[in-house]
Image (cartoon, rainbow, N blue to C red):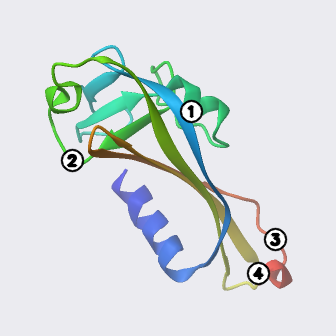
Amino acid sequence: MKVLFVLLFSLMTFANQKVLSKRTVTLPVDISTAKLKWTSLGYGETFFVKIIVPELAGETIMNHRNVGEDGPCMFTYDTQHLEDVIGNNPGVEDIDFEITLTKFFSKDAQGQCRVSLQENINANIRGFKFTHTLSHQMPNRVGEDCF
């Protein structure tokens, strides 16, 4: 997992980038123990408060679902306690999700154009920032395609 983060950071730091799309969608979110979890599933040994939002599947390009979950997920660094998010008020709320698709590109040592796509989702749920990012390496292209 750490290698993936280092690779992604290196790619984003040294590559050119272009935002392909940025949009906000409003989706219903079940803020209860049914969809909010304290888990390391999909994150190695690190535990996070994670929320499952099945409706995100229809709005994103990449698969943000962890194996074994019933929908795409997002996590927060802002708390380690489900109760902080749920409070005494479980329920379904309409939440705005910002979805950004970015193209990263650079020429490699052989002069080929290396391209990856990154999809980033952010949402503020009851004052907590939830996020999820995926990156996918595309097939190499001819060097002239890197502009």
Q: Which residue is mark 3?
A: 141
Q: Residue at x 72, y 59 (%)?
A: 138
Q: Could you say where residue 74 lies in the image, as x and y percent from the top left?
A: 40, 38
Q: CA distance from mark 2 to mark 3?
A: 40 Å
Say whether disc 3 or disc 4 marks the residue closer to the N-terminus. 3
* Label 1: element kind: helix
Quadrant where the C terminus sits is: bottom right
Furthest residue to the top?
34
Q: Which residue is mark 4?
A: 146
| Residue 43 shows up from this direction | no
Q: Vertically, is 75 above or below 119? A: above
Residue 99 has which mark? none
Q: CA distance from mark 3 to mark 4?
A: 8 Å
Q: Which residue is mark 2?
A: 78
Say whether disc 1 or disc 2 marks the residue closer to the N-terminus. 1
Residue 56 has which mark? 1
